[in-house]
Amino acid sequence: MTERTTTETADVGEPRRRGPYRKSRLVRRRILDAALEVFAQSGYRTGSVREIAARVGMSEAGLLHHFPSKSALLAAVLAHRDAQAAERVDRDTDDGLVALARLVGLARADADRPRVVELYCVISAEATAPDHPAHAFFVDRYARLRARIADSFERVRDAGQLRDGVDPQRAAAQMMAVWDGLQLQWLLDRSSVDVAAELADHVQRHLGVPLPRA
């Protein structure tokens, strides 16, 4: 079955909208997709609003009508990308083991999107500065991810599938740290490490049952 992205599923259950509202929404989606490509290929500093606008066949002023600044566009791109990832991980499951396996699956899929991984590594490092336009986004992002992963480990524990003595909150923080570190090593040398395989091995050390492949 073909996976639908969050932007595609956003229309499900909503009344059909026509006219300017629906057209504006479609334009914003096209801008976000183009901006993701440009920022992933060129980085935030080098990627230009002009190039993004050209990719969607509009003027720079027209793009800025939808996103008032480059920093606002960056924040929207990051949120858009995270929403797509969350849709893949959270869809149709209350099983913590499956949710953890899908996170490893995301790491596996990211091997085909090195520019996107690079964008996140670079921007998250830059965003440690409180005045960076993406600072608040990444503070919130890490808090949400820790909570989501901890919840998955808690569900695994409640199902009797977690090793004795494993704390879900600490396991979540450790998983995120391992994932970030593995991605950095991989970006520096693509032959140095298999991010998904090493991440799966790390998660497996917390489990009392085999981690399924997702």
Image (tube, rainbow, N blue to C red):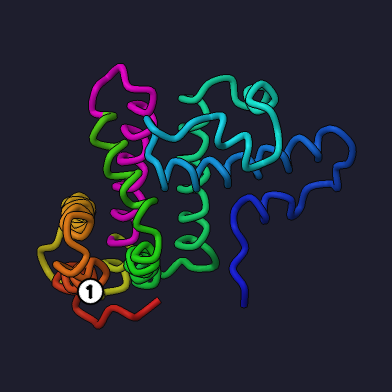
Q: Position of residue 178 (x, y in %)?
A: 17, 56
Residue 22 visible in image: yes
- Comparing 121 with 200, the one in front is 121
Secondary structure character of the magenta stretch overall: helix
| Image height of 169 relative to 42, above or below | below
Name which residue lies at 15% across and 57% down: 185
Q: Position of residue 170 (x, y in %)?
A: 16, 51
- Comparing 45 with 137, the one in front is 45
Name which residue lies at 81% across and 40% down: 22
Q: Magenta residues?
A: 128-153
- On screen, residue 74 versus residue 201, left or right, reads right
Name which residue lies at 29% across and 60% down: 154
Instruction: From the image, tell me which residue sits under label 1.
Output: 197
Q: How many marks?
A: 1
Instruction: Say if the magenta span includes residue 134.
Output: yes
| Number of other residues with Cα within 10 Å of mark 1, as a class: few under 14, some 14 to 19, many 20 or more | few
- Comparing 74 with 47, the one in front is 47
- On screen, residue 34 versus residue 25, left or right, reads left
